[in-house]
Amino acid sequence: MIQGMMQDESDVLVVGAGVVGCAVAREASRHALRVCVLEQAGDVAEGSTKANSAIVHAGYDAVPGTAKARFNVRGNALFEDWCRELDVPFVRNTSLVAAFDDRDLAALEALRLRGERNGVPGLRVLAQDEVRALEPNISRSVIGALLAPSGGICCPYGLTFRLAEHAAANGVAFFFERRVVDVARAADGLWQVTTADGAVFRTRAVVNAAGLYADELNNMVSAQKLSITPRRGEYLMLDKQYAGTFRATIFQVPTPLGKGVLVSPTVDGTLIVGPTAEDVGDKSDTRTTADGLRKVVESAARVWEQVPAGGVIATFSGLRAHGDRDDFLVGEAPDAPFFFNAAAMESPGLTAAPAVAVWLAEQIGRALDAQRATHYVQHTATWKPFREMTDAQRIAAIADDPSYARIVCRCENVTEAEIRAAIRSRIGARTLDGVKRRTRAGMGRCQGGFCTPRIIAILCDELGLTPEQITKFGGGSNLLVTTHGARPATLGLSPERRESRVGRREVCHD
Amino acid sequence: MTDVDILIIGGGPAGLAAAIAAHEAGCRNVLLLEREPALGGILRQCIHAGFGMHVFKEDLTGPEYAQRFVQRFHALGLSAQCDTMALSVTPDREVTAVSPAFGLQRFRAKAVVLAMGCRERTRGALRVPGWRPAGIYPAGQAQRFVNLDGWMPGRRVVILGSGDIGLIMARRMTLEGAEVLACVELMPFSGGLTRNVVQCLDDYGIPLLLSHTVTEIHGRERLEAVTVAQVDAQRKPLPGTEQRFECDTLLLSVGLIPENELSRAAGVRVSEVTCGPLVDDALQTSVPGIFACGNVLHVHDLVDHVTVESTEAGRQAAKYARGQGEAGHPACQMLQIRDGAGVRGLVPQTVCAVRVADALPLMFRPAAVFKDAAAVVRLDGEEVLRKRFRILTPGEMVRLVVPKEVLERHAGAGELTVEVTV
């Protein structure tokens, strides 16, 4: 890359391809604006978006009057429609906040009142017998609970892929492996955004959706400094065997550090337990710890007496972008016109994302005096997972594409057709984890033990790569090492796809 | 809907032996479904020797052992459908399967034999803390990479767990040019066969660190190192004993889990000890007409034992399909089989003493290492059989045969237990 080379000129440049960045890009694409997204990782949803509780919060937690409160309740109201439009799962499974003593019961009442002020519908404090009627497997030490009927669960990365697909279908350009190192105002008034490889992107408006790194970006242009602390949360994922244990998401009365350890079904049919809340020094420190995982189990045991240790299929941790203002920082920076923050989006950041995106896109559209786009694509096609099809749908899908009849991931019944579709989509998978998060192949109880070689072979076939070039999640995460006389994986690879697709992926403006 | 007499799910050593036995018992309408493109199951990637010492009195490799059954299978004119995944089994033995060649298919079987094998325990189940880089594989997956795909998973290797696949892979990776630094085992004894410890670790100078475990995983992208620490009697890491192994690969050989998702969905009751179906002496599960054998029933060490067990399952399934099976011996009295002290996972769990042909084979794992011990069989508390062993370890399954006359002498007994005493 030539130093200072002009890479792209746009009206709106979004930094960060997490759920917030992709949502803002998608909403901005409703306007007649050239929008681009820069992402430091090799794929969308690689930061906080991929590792959180996946809860669509009702909105009783946030302090009334804060941005968190406002965008949480609005975001919750938008979530169902967004997920339906984008063909991604969403379940309004309700939330319960469990109380264990009289002080907790008082706290529930305070939460209920707070929620009502925030506009959360249907909140009700339940007595022990009502709680047990709803959740027969809940611990007997739970003596009451706040019921939030609007609480839900979603698939954060699935939502983000689809937002990115939809944005790309509406002309949004995506640039991956582009870490922003400088944002400065050029002489002509445009923003000039420089990435680590020396490329320069010129744009009229910048959206800071850089997650954990949003403070660095904000502080490049604004005197109103922001500081973000990575707050780590560790989780356990349990096998589908335990799917029926709880119907609602079960919280415990919150503490100053956060909403505490929850137990919740996921939209995939597994059960998630976590998170811890621990401030760490490093914005990339997603290690799990023996201590943390033990705390998760101990804390969850208040709600679920016997967390089945043998049922754990995966452990992971994620980092929340905790801002020093204890609130989201959303909107145009007062001292940096045309620089829009969507920063410090810790919980309920996922829930708030749709509302923040709608509001910010409106602000940006107005600031740039933009018209509505004349050709807005309302719906983009996606594949239907084989595991969710009826027999009749399966027969039809197989008739259309026989690779729907080849099961690659046996735990989650993911077919070759779905994996190829995930790679071929606009913002397609390039890595094992990319395939995993788009299709669930390798996310089941064997954690890829059987399907990994097959997915490597399909990635090689689709991308024209050798097995040694396939990574888990980009960078140096290669799955295999080069050997003397290593042979490429071939699956009847057509010559035109032989052309190597190694290197940085870009989905550019037409 | 296609009607078959016996439908066998899985074309590994268990399914093959069951199919052959069913055919030899006179059943001509047998169909076997296999999800891989070829028959043979896990044996296809087990290219080491040591198979067949009991059944063939020969030392064969895995593919050689499998090939004998595949050839017999074809010679008998039996039919298999490869590349076919069974999606569901109902309690009335309707099976839905899918394959690129035939699309979605439904079968109705008079008897079903479950022979789906097992899967490997994962890092998640162990909760090993640290980063989640590339380079951490179940040992069997690495074995597939090396032996079937011709891919090399890494160059400097630590193995966690000393199950047989881990031991075999320690040698295999060494032969492929990798450096295997250590095999780390949480328990004070190996989880694998003694012969594998000798032939795969000792012969190559690979240290076996007993009462040790991996306490942290290092490396953000590719694995860079693991921390290994000694553990106390409660298996908790001892502070101050940590050592760091620079490695790019960690292979896990920490246990196998029978794959009973289809079985559970069919209503088959599954044992919490073996993680396989509860079966009677005919290897019939709690759902009439559904039989189970091989690693889906309980994890074996020796394929020879799988063959013997699965031959019986095939024979019994054939009987059932002809309408002569059922727990239906008129004088049948079910004897409950229970694990006694020092014994884990007895199979079968119930027996019809009248039906037993000439002897009842019992299989179990010792709960710990016992030297100069005896396995004692009791009927309603009364000792009826005692067999001495120089050494018993959890890594080696014990097969104990109770002669029919012993059962007959105690007709009317309600409970059979096996215990290990020193």
Image (tube, coloured by chain):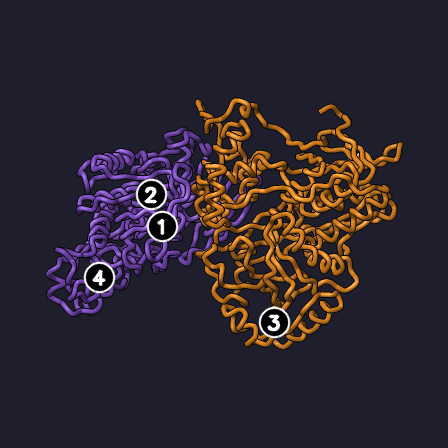
Q: Please give the chain letter of the residue carrying mark 3.
A: A
Three-letter code, disc 1? Val
Circles 1, 3 touching at the beta carbon (< 8 Å): no
Q: Where is residue A324 in the image (x, y as percent from the top left)?
A: 76, 54
Q: Residue at x 61, y 71 (%)?
A: A145
Task: Say which quarter of the image contains residue A475.
Answer: top right
| Pointer 4 and pointer 3 on the same chain | no
User: What number is the disc on residue B95?
Assistant: 1
Q: Residue at x 25, y 55 (%)?
A: B283
Circles 2, 4 touching at the beta carbon (< 8 Å): no
Distance, label 1 to label 3, CA atoms, is: 44 Å
Task: Say which quarter of the image contains residue B169.
Answer: top left
Mark 2 or mark 4, earlier in chain: 2
Compared with residue A338, is residue A1 higher up or lower down, i.e. above or below?
above
Other residues around mark 3 within 10 Å, as few (<14) / some (14–19) / many (≥20): many
Determine which residue is flagged by label 3. A145
Circles 2, 1 touching at the beta carbon (< 8 Å): yes
The quadrant the C terminus of chain A occupies is top right
User: What number is the disc on residue B33?
Assistant: 2
